[in-house]
Amino acid sequence: MSMKFDIQPASNPTSEKDRIAKLVDPGFGRVFTDHMAIVRYNQAKSGWYEARIEARANFQLDPAGAVLHYAQEIFEGLKAYKRDDGGVNLFRPDANARRFKDSADRMAMAQLPEDVFIEAVEQVVRIDRAWMPGGEGSLYLRPFMIASETFLGVKPSSEYIFAVIASPVGSYFKGGPAPVSIWVSENYTRAAIGGTGAVKCGGNYAASLRAQAEAIQHGCDQVVFLDAVERRYIEELGGMNIFFVFDDGSLSTPPLGTILPGITRDSIITLARDAGKTVREEPYSLEQWRKDAASGKLKEAFACGTAAVISPIGKVRSVSGDFEISGGAAGPVAMGLRKQLVDIQYGRTNDPHNWIRKVF
Ligand SMILES: *Cc1c(COP(=O)(O)O)cnc(C)c1O
């Protein structure tokens, strides 16, 4: 299915002077562009209708709107990257579109056709092209969908709003990625078998915030969760997947199931295997992690996701004690994979898996 977007440019967009000022140091997720994409869904109107690109504005939502009560909400996160020739790349937007459909399915929401998802993202990039930061910055795109039916009964909503907003972001790490410290959450879990851990719903984040606050209280940057059954195996961070690098050159990462199937995770597995490395998708326990860090068998650990690409993990803290990884410094495997991925995203190297989709 394809939909024609009705394009209505903002009548009062940000002035060039203000835009340039906002792009100097945008940080993450605080500066927004002038437009958004909207597509509405109504079961009674036989599905998706009214696809629009319009000025970014508040939503009209009844106080009894379903999302406000029962959290029927999903989202995605991807970036547009400016190439040296002035063009703009998206990285694997088809994978985001597919995952968004899977998330909708799990949350009993209407499934947006993948080509409409991609078209909405591309239209926002096109109309707000002037907001693309240069250098190592990018335009972060946030597609999301909310249940908008006015009804307090507990059931899947019959109405939805899909939207895409855009936020220029600076380089996540100025002067190269600094290793992060992580706190192992032994009180809270993130996801159980049969739950929603594998889909990108806002509720997962709501449930992770208390654990993240605990991490901050313990002087750590991020939280890492253990499996909900045995409370032994490493799952992932609040919003990033995790990899381990061993002294024989192999890598391991927790298997899919309850974790979020990250597109960065999948890309790293592919790039590492392309380079002839062994990558295992298998459970890895906190005890083993501690032992391997102490014996030197474990050389590096890193977290990965669209926002930060790859963050080396320098230090792990838990109620059962702390340990360091690669002397608390960024390791060469993490940094090599990071450069390879970023070079593909910005179009500085060839793209053997056809991951790039050029918007311009
Ligand atoms: C989005 C997300 C990730 C990373 O996914 P990417 O597709 O690589 O950005 C990892 N874990 C969680 C919980 C997430 O929500």
Image (spheres, helix red, strand yellow):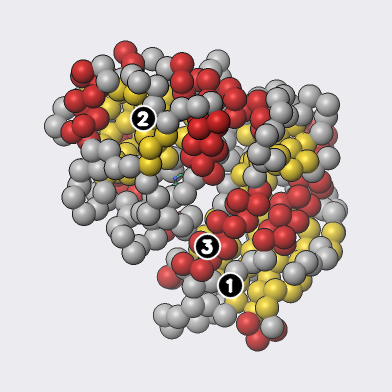
Disc 1 versus disc 3: distance between alpha carbons?
A: 10 Å
Q: Secondary structure at mark 1?
A: loop
Looking at the image, which residue is at 37% across and 54% down? 257
The kind of residue tagged 1 is: Ala
In screen coordinates, is 122 left or right of 223?
right
Residue at the front extreme, as displayed: 276
Residue contact between numbered discs 3 and 2, judged by CB atoms under 8 Å? no
Alpha carbon separation for disc pair 3 and 2: 27 Å
- Give the x, y percent position of residue 21: 73, 29
Comparing 8 with 45, the one in front is 45
Q: Where's the N terminus, which quadrant?
A: bottom right
Using the image, tell me which numbered label, if any, was put on residue 110.
1
Q: Amino acid at mark 2?
A: Phe
The tag earlier along the polypeptide, 1 or 2, is: 1
In the rendered image, which residue does mark 2 sit on? 244
Foreground tag (3 vs 2): 2
Q: Assess disc 2: are there few (<14), some (14-19) or many (≥20) residues with their C-alpha within 10 Å of its C-alpha.
A: many
Residues at discs 1 and 3 in contact (Cβ within 8 Å): no
Give the residue pinned by disc 3.
Answer: 102
Tell me: 255 left or right of 9: left
For residue 9, say whether it is visible: yes
Closer to the camera, 283 or 40?
A: 283
Q: Is residue 158 above or below residue 312?
A: below
- Front tag of 1 and 2: 2
Q: Position of residue 159 (x, y in %)?
A: 60, 76
Q: Nearer the viewer, residue 253 or 133?
A: 253
- Dot 3: within a 10 Å radius of its alpha carbon, few (fewer than 14), some, or many (20 or more) residues? some
The residue lying at 50 percent from left, 27 percent from top is 276
Query: Which amino acid, by three-letter code, is at mark 3?
Result: Asp
Q: Residue at x 49, y 36 (%)?
A: 269
Are the two marked residues, 1 and 2, in contact with CB atoms closer than 8 angstroms?
A: no
